[in-house]
Amino acid sequence: MPYKVLVVDDSSFFRRRVTDILNKDPQLEVIDVAVNGQEAVDKALTLKPDVITMDIEMPVLNGISAVKKIMVQSPTAILMFSSLTHQGAKSTLEALEAGALDFLPKKFSEIAQNSDEAGSLLRQRVVQLARKRGIVKSQFITNRIVTTRTPATQTPISTRKHQASLTRDVVERSDTKKLQAIFNKPSGKSYKLLAIGTSTGGPVALQKILSQLPANFSLPIIMVQHMPATFTQAFANRLNSLCEINVKEASDGDILKPGCAYLAPGGRQMIISGTENAAKIKIIDDNSAKITFKPSVDVSFGSAAKIFNGNVLGVILTGMGADGREGSRMLKAKGATIWAQDEQTSVVYGMPQAVYVAGISQLSLPLDSIASTILKEVMYG
């Protein structure tokens, strides 16, 4: 039986185009279309599709509001179509926080060289989400936990400091049995950097992890998320509003500081330079056809291996493809520790699987346990 898809867009041309593209894959069947958000909510409830493709700007009910209602009434895997603008970035991030699993630019010319390549990418993304439709309900709960937090920028400083001081106790008390089963005791290893790489499903995963780290987190953090250039600034700002640690889009010349997370800017490469005790970020343009991803986890992790040697904790989260495998291999060769998100909680088990199958990762962790296990290993071991 093919996976059932509901296509939602107020443009009849775009509805036909997406329908034609998806129906070329025998694994997919567009069972219906909707012309606005409210119709999408109604048809999601009655038709029970495996995946919904959703526009953001629509009459009657917009895409973000439709996602919120669908996730309450009939949780479904949702792929958003977004414009590559600052407002489009903010709206897409809101949709992901509301429960959508992935997004693509609405203008296919912005994601591929030709229509055939764009169509193939769209079909691949929809099939991947259909296969992980069982994760939707738990992923939605994760979103709710993250987004219902009071933004850190609105919390009194005294309260934030008190919350940070409580983090150690909370970590030690929560999920003790689960942690013991996954990670009996910290290694005692000393670290100078936490490096995280991710793609599809990464925005929610990163929010889940970073929002649990205390303001006095002892390491600098570099993050590579496959994301368009217009999205990374908005994403970094949103993370910063949700987290006790400081989060920013990385800039050329930034000095790596403990308790600060640096998000690689979209469309460019983030390199670590300097020395282990005086490391800084270098942002470079990359026109090489040999490197598919800009930013690339392999590039950033590889540069971290040269500066920090084995004093790195690397974590590969949900994502399509294998970016991060070679960079993680370089880190591990220097003695670094590499972990991966497990298959059950990954939206797409491509990147974590690549490091697991290659024998590079030492642990496969469920998303809910990653932050607490990092804290146990890095700060409270």
Image (spheres, helix red, strand yellow):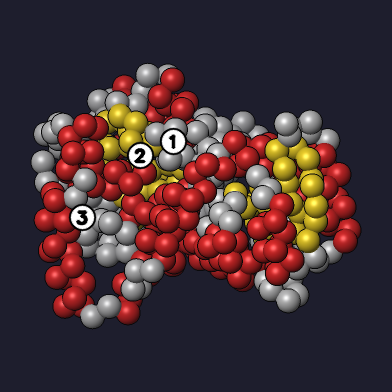
| Secondary structure at numbered mark 3 | loop
Regarding residue 237, the answer to whether it shows in the image is yes
Q: Amino acid at mark 1?
A: Gln
- Residue drawn 27% across and 65% down? 244
Q: Label 3 belongs to which residue?
A: 217
Q: Which mark is residue 171?
A: none
Residue 121's spot in the image, x, y percent?
71, 39
Query: Which image quarter holds the C terminus?
Result: top left
Residue 123 falls left or right of residue 163: right
| Secondary structure at numbered mark 1 | loop
Query: Which image quarter holds the N terminus?
Result: top right
For label 2, count other residues whose C-alpha is less than 10 Å away and answer few (under 14), some (14-19) or many (20+): some
Q: Quadrant of residue 21?
A: top right
Q: How many marks?
A: 3
Residue 102's spot in the image, x, y percent?
59, 50
Give the mark, 3 or 2, whose residue is nearer the N terminus: 3
Give the mark, 1 or 3, whose residue is nearer the N terminus: 3
The answer to the question of whether label 2 and label 1 lie on touching residues, with beta carbons closer than 8 A, is yes
Q: Is residue 99 above or below residue 327?
A: below
Q: Quick one: 341 or 6, which is closer to the camera?
A: 6
**Which mark is nearer the camera, 1 or 3?**
1
Residue 257's spot in the image, x, y percent?
25, 56
Q: Label 1 belongs to which residue?
A: 344
Q: Amino acid at mark 2?
A: Pro
